[in-house]
Image (spheres, rainbow, N blue to C red):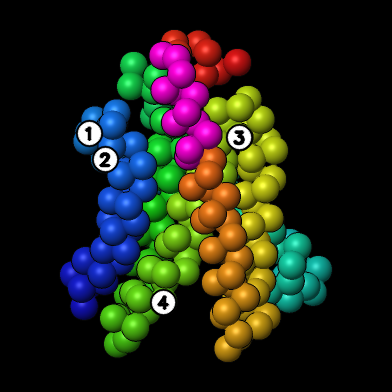
Amino acid sequence: MVTSSLIFGIIPSIVWLAFFLFEDRRHPEPKRMIFYVFLAGGLSTAIAAIPELYIQRIFSLGGELTSSLSLLFSFAFVEELAKFIAVYLVVSKSKFFDEWVDGMIYMVTAGLGFAAIENILNLIGTSLIVEVTLIRGIGATLLHALASGVVGFYWMRGRVIEGLFFAAIIHGLFNFLILKLGGLEVYASLLLLLVAIFTLHDFEILKRRDALRMIKRPSLRR
């Protein structure tokens, strides 16, 4: 059961990772960097866990529902910040962090690593492995990739806080729609579709910048 959970938990992230790496096919990042960032994204679940437990305790003491909007947005912000910290620590001084689009590629990769761990934890103990894998693969896994991509885009524009804010809004709103409108997942799906359109457009913006001129690493941190 644990082995199946590991395999099926990682599959959706690998599929989406292949899709997003195709966006950077002309100047791909080294496979080892992708692996390190994916692993860092997975480990960032531990970074997020401690403040999330503390936040949940505060809401419980205050008598708030665990599905309250403020709690969901708090969790979302913590997770997006944890993923960003993980990526920053791994790539900020790397010689392979040398293009505008790299910020989005690495953030999406970390988001998928985070999602892989979440998927594995959700699959452990369930008998509906295939069903849960499909649902989370289309929903939560893609959500983490897109929200992280938003952070990556704003990071490359020198507006990380703004990116974290927008990512948390997207992340929290998706979870709210899933929890509050159970059975009407179409609204959450439409949200993901809309964000996906903007995220792919953001990829194109950064790729055009890379095509216009080769930039040096200090330029990425302006």
* Real-space CA distance between mark 1 and mark 2, rounded to the nearest whole angstrom: 5 Å
Residue topped by disc 2: 35
Mark seen at residue 9: none
Task: Verify CB contact (< 8 Å) between mark 1 and mark 2.
Answer: yes
Residue topped by disc 4: 135
Q: Amino acid at mark 3?
A: Tyr
Task: Verify CB contact (< 8 Å) between mark 3 and mark 4.
Answer: no
* Real-space CA distance between mark 1 and mark 3, rounded to the nearest whole angstrom: 25 Å
Q: Amino acid at mark 2?
A: Phe
Q: Is residue 13 left or right of residue 219?
A: left
Sooner in the amino-acid sequence: mark 4 or mark 2: 2
Q: Amino acid at mark 1?
A: Arg
At x 49%, y 47%, the residue is 200
From the viewer's perspective, is residue 64 above or below residue 201?
A: below
Foreground disc of the pair 2, 3: 3
Q: Position of residue 123 (x, y in %)?
A: 34, 75
Task: Name the secondary structure under disc 1.
Answer: helix
Sooner in the amino-acid sequence: mark 1 or mark 3: 1
* Residue 37 in view, yes or no: no
Sooner in the amino-acid sequence: mark 3 or mark 4: 4
Q: Nearer the viewer, residue 181 or 216?
A: 216
Residue topped by disc 3: 154
Query: Magenta span has 212?
Result: yes
Residue topped by disc 1: 32
Label 2: few (<14), some (14–19) or many (≥20) C-alpha neighbours in 10 Å: some
